Amino acid sequence: MKKEQETEVYDIEVMVADESHEKYVDTILDTIEAAAKVRGTGIAKRSHEYVAQKMREGKVVIALSGDEFAGFSYIESWGNKQYVATSGLIVADRFRNRGLARRIKHAAFQLARLRWPKAKLFSLTSGSAVMKMNTELGYFPVTFADLTDDEAFWRGCNGCVNHDVLTRTQRRYCICTAMLFDPDDERCLMLEKLCNTFVKKDARRKTAGAGVKINKKPEKTPA
């Protein structure tokens, strides 16, 4: 059974979304909302147009099993592209517990590193699985003060059920844990390289491995 599941999950294609994938937006939003209710955790709500625009900008990673939605994550730059967040990681129910979330997370990280190689990547999460994946990629826990001060980013937390915690503490902390990947930190780069090595070895082991389609050029980052 495990071997059958493994083969199935590697038949799933993980790719950078574009406008042709906008038909999946409502399914993505419904899946994220349902997962948040099951976990009993807060989530920053996003509109249909917000996610669709990210697809048009090439900032969404989507996983599909044929024409069926399997998983999603997106990236966004903040603070004049000095900071980049990877957010909204979700896997549809029937595709969970098969390693797909890890593939999507790695693909989103690779996309962010390719488009903004000098930017600091950060993540806010209350999930232990995401924290583990972040650690594999080279993220380290930090205080909220180490994240972007871009007000547009923090307004995105307004729809979270735990937003009152964030405001009561003057944005010093909340339910989520803040994690940061700094491209100027040798520790981060070492873990990134180590992770890439293991990912490549793992991909070679999978006879049915599916590639990640990332065809984006780096964007210029202000000096």
Image (cartoon, grey):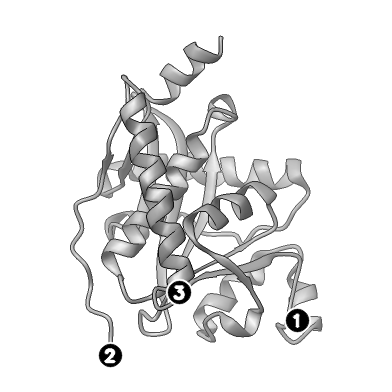
Distance Cα–Cα, label 1 vs label 2? 32 Å
Q: Looking at the rendering, which quadrant does residue 135 occupy?
A: bottom right
Which residue is label 3 attached to? 182
Distance Cα–Cα, label 2 vs label 3? 15 Å
Tell me whether the residue at label 3 lies in contact with that at label 1, contact meaning CB atoms closer than 8 angstroms: no
Residue 167 higher or lower than 21, as above or below: below
Distance Cα–Cα, label 3 vs label 1? 26 Å
Which residue is label 2 attached to? 223
Q: Looking at the rendering, which quadrant does residue 13 occupy?
A: top left
Residue 20 higher or lower than 143, as above or below: above
Residue 3 higher or lower than 211, as above or below: above
Say which residue appears at 36% left-offset and 23% top-offset: 11
Say which residue appears at 51% left-offset and 40% top-offset: 101
Q: Is residue 141 left or right of residue 188?
A: right
Q: Where does the image place residue 64, in percent across and percent down from the top left?
A: 38, 32
| Amino acid residing under circle 3 | Asp
Image quarter hosting the N terminus: top right
Q: Is residue 96 left or right of residue 49?
A: right
